[in-house]
Image (spheres, rainbow, N blue to C red):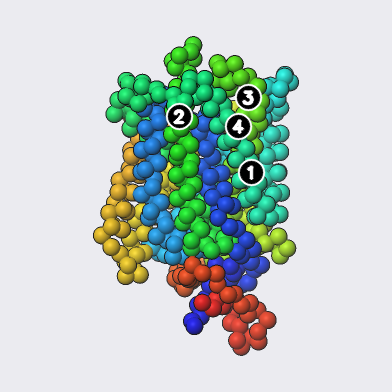
Amino acid sequence: MKTEESHSSSAASPSGTRHGGLRANSLGFPPLVAQSIAVISPTMTAVLIIPLAFTDAGEGTWLAYLFGTIMLLFVVFGLNQFASRSTSPGSMYAYTGKGLGPTFGVLSGWTLMWCYMFIGIAGLCGFEIFSNSFINAIGINGHIPSVLLFAVSAGLCWLVAYKDIRLSSLLMLGLEAVSVTLILGLAFVVLFKHGIPPVDTHQLALKGTSIHGMSFAIVITIFSLVGFEAATTLGGEARDALRNIPRAVIVSLLLTGAFMVFMSYVEVFATRNSPASSNLGTLATPLNTIASLYKVGYFKAPISLGAMVSFFSLSLSCLNAGARIIYPMGRHGVFHATSGKAHAKHQTPHVAISAFIIIMFAIAGSLQIWSNPLNIFGDAGTLAAFGFLTAYFLIAIAAPVYLRKLGELKPGNIAIAVIGFICLLVPLVGSFYPAPPWPVWTYPYGFLAYMIVGGLWIFSRTRSRTGILGEIEADLEKGPEIDAEEPTVIDVTDLPHEVASPTLIRDTVA
């Protein structure tokens, strides 16, 4: 029998401050999958993104999504080297710190905050777009102000995330399932009309598809699939985390990738022999157009409603993920200590949740003054993509370094890391060449400025609190590296002061 210090379910900062903990062992496999799928948001791709990929790939759109899924699998393999060995709240932040040291770990956390912030803002915009689409589909003429719908979505997200992570996860799972079911219903209407199986020789032969166009489309497909790592942010609350989190990451990517391959095939197929066939790339609401083309207009309202609740689920998942990045960073002293506290009753990171949703709403509300939700949606997704790429690059590098520290590095691990790194170069290069139009070409530099601010913040924290990086590193190094079996947790807070040291909140007996 051995004893290890575990921080997977504690809330101890390196300085020894004890905060209320998150609800450990409360999330099984389905809620973890729901967290990642909600951030990827397959509904978002089906209702808004596939036409963008079609603009470049044409008949090869389905193949671009297949390639994008396979390429990101190599990133997942590297990520799961950590997820199968260690788990804690905000795990991507911890993973990078374990491999590359606390400075890069904090920068990874800083990057992920950017990612979840802007994807969450895209979710608010999608909620607004399809809320108004829904009321028009049911025959109500009018337009609800954007800022009001932003407030409704943000307020409901805050309430659910503040109250209970289990409720959040189940709600995300249910909402996305409803939306995807409705979309698949329309897809099968299209397929049955043409007979099963409907063979589209144009798509299977990749008619008119060029390598140049495919390369640009793959950039879009990869950006459509980012977010699969979101399950790792719930490491402090997962049940059988070392087994369920790696499975959730892979399953979420494979399920959403398969859905996107299928829906891209259906949307291209459905619009070819129609007046809209040459305009799929410019359709703002392709599924509504397909519903009209196939004389099933009654699908418009349900699909708009499904998309609306799916985008709500997207913002909720980003709020949960972003708050659980802030939470450990608050515990480690990177941010104010209050951001590392959990609610005594609900066992959620309530301070981080409140701060994150306020900033998310403030940015979305400010941008809508001089732009519209559809443009904000596109801009927010583009901005978030640079953050995801940076975080994934760090993981691709950190994984072999981490395994080398453990003495478990094998040639296959190096090969996977190299392939994953090369795959990530595809969307990175595609983001700069050819140069995108104004103002999109400025976005990478905006992200770079944000990262510089993060670096300066870390520097200032190391100057004002000597030894903070060493404390973070020590905290990350000592746990939990545990077996996949459920640990027996003994709370030592009631033990005499001589036994319960200030920095040891829980002992995990393996």
Answer with the quarter of the image where residue 323 lies: bottom right
Identify the mark nearer the N-term, 2 or 3.
Answer: 2
Q: CA distance from mark 4 to mark 1?
A: 12 Å
Mark earlier in primary sequence (4, 1): 1
Task: Note whether residue 462 is visible.
Answer: no
Residue furthest to the top in view is: 275
Residue 32 makes an appearance in the image: yes
Residue marked by disc 3? 299
> In the image, residue 134 lies at what x, y percent?
67, 26
Q: Position of residue 18 (x, y in %)?
A: 63, 72
Give the residue at x 63% y 41%.
Answer: 175
Residue at label 1? 174
Amino acid beneath label 2: Ser
Task: Identify the amino acid type marked 1.
Answer: Gly
Q: Which residue is mark 4?
A: 182
Q: Residue at x 50, y 24 (%)?
A: 191
* Residue 46 or residue 497, whichever sits in front: 46
- Amino acid, disc 4: Leu
Side of 24 where 111 appears, left or right: left
Residue contact between numbered discs 3 and 4, judged by CB atoms under 8 Å: yes
- For image coordinates 48% across by 41% down, the residue present is 256
**Whole-Å distance between the Cαs marked 1 and 3?**
19 Å
Which residue position holds label 2? 264
Task: Identify the element where label 1 is drawn.
Answer: helix
- Label 4: which secondary element: helix
Q: Position of residue 254 (x, y in %)?
A: 45, 44
Residue 138: x and y in percent read 71, 22
Classed neighbour count for the residue bearing mark 2: other residues with Cα under 10 Å, few (<14), some (14–19), many (≥20): many
CA gap between label 1 and label 2 equals 23 Å
